[in-house]
């Protein structure tokens, strides 16, 4: 297990500068949140590999930049648009494979989407099967404002896809959607491959870890009891801090706590 930090936590710092900072600080795991089309070019992956060479930093996951467009491009009723989008999505699998990342995170469809859950799962698996050819697993993330925020939808995915489905748990997204983390974990049937961590309290729903009242020890104990041995990535928004050093202090405090 490693406690890492997603590059999304440093937005709008350029991705390569965030990676360099993480490597410099001795962080062991990160997720790259892609923020521009040029970052999908093979030359950019090579650049990232040069930056992390000689460090302990590993890339665990890639987060697509067009999550806002997934309902329209991937989960609409227009089949042709989805077929074309599959080709575009391959660039993320290629990037992940080049960087040694195991996972791609998907937000999915909006609650207003018209595809039945069976159709949604078919689209998901069509992408997941492509990912398998690259040695990369597609993960469904629970996200407020998307169908995946609803525990019943997550249960339906588990029921339909069984062991073919795996999830990213995001703490702040469960809080924003009005559900507890145990409720989301139960709905996911603990089929977890990746975890985004943050803290919360009455002061805010997206705080740096150890700045709120979330029980991280209980979470990790619970996940380990269900077989999870992956990484935990700090993912917060820029409103959660004033200086980058606060992120690294939170990281250290969390390691000391655990």
Image (cartoon, rainbow, N blue to C red):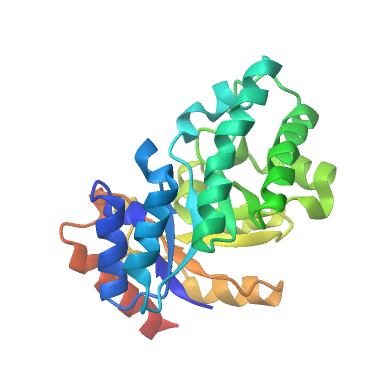
Seen from the viewer's position, the closer of residues 165 and 36 is: 36
Q: Position of residue 93 (x, y in %)?
A: 58, 48
Seen from the viewer's position, the closer of residues 219 and 14 is: 14
Q: Position of residue 219 (x, y in %)?
A: 55, 70
Figure quadrant of residue 243: bottom left
Quadrant in which the C terminus is drawn: bottom left
Side of 209 relative to 179 (left or right) = left
Q: Position of residue 115 (x, y in %)?
A: 71, 22
Q: Is residue 44 above or below residue 81?
A: below
Count the marks. 0
What residue do we see at 51% from left, 77% from top?
217
Q: Residue furthest top?
A: 78
What residue do we see at 36% from left, 60% from top?
48
What residue do we see at 53% from left, 70% from top?
231
Visible in this render: residue 181? yes
Side of 157 relative to 51 (left or right) = right
Side of 147 relative to 205 (left or right) = right
What residue do we see at 67% from left, 24% from top?
83
Q: Position of residue 18 (x, y in %)?
A: 28, 59
Figure quadrant of residue 244: bottom left
Quadrant in which the N terminus is drawn: bottom right
Visible in this render: residue 202? no
Seen from the viewer's position, the closer of residues 136 and 233 is: 136
Q: Is residue 129 above or below residue 220?
A: above
Figure quadrant of residue 114: top right
């Amino acid at each position: 297990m490693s406690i890492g930090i997603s590059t999304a936590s440093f937005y709008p710092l350029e991705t390569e500068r965030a990676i360099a900072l993480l490597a410099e600080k001795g962080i062991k795991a990160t997720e790259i949140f892609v923020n521009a089309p040029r970052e999908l070019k093979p030359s950019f992956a090579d650049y990232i590999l040069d930056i992390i060479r000689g460090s302990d930093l590993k890339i665990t996951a890639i987060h697509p930049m067009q999550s806002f467009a997934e309902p329209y491009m991937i989960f609409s009723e227009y089949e042709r648009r989805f077929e074309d989008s599959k080709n575009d999505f391959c660039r993320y699998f290629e990037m992940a494979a080049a960087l040694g990342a195991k996972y791609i995170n998907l937000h999915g469809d909006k609650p207003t989407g018209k595809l039945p859950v069976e159709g949604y799962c078919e689209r998901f698996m069509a992408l997941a099967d492509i990912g398998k050819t690259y040695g990369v697993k597609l993960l469904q993330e629970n996200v407020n404002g998307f169908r995946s925020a609803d525990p019943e939808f997550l249960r339906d995915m588990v029921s339909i896809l069984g062991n073919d489905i795996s999830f990213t748990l995001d703490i702040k997204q469960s809080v924003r959607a009005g559900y507890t983390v145990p409720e989301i974990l139960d709905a996911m049937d603990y089929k977890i491959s990746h975890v985004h961590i943050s803290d919360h309290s009455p002061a805010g729903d997206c705080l740096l870890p150890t700045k709120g009242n979330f029980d991280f020890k209980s979470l990790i104990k619970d996940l380990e009891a269900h077989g999870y041995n992956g990484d935990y990535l700090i993912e917060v928004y820029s409103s959660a801090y004033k200086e980058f050093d606060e992120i690294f202090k939170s990281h250290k405090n969390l390691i000391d706590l655990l």
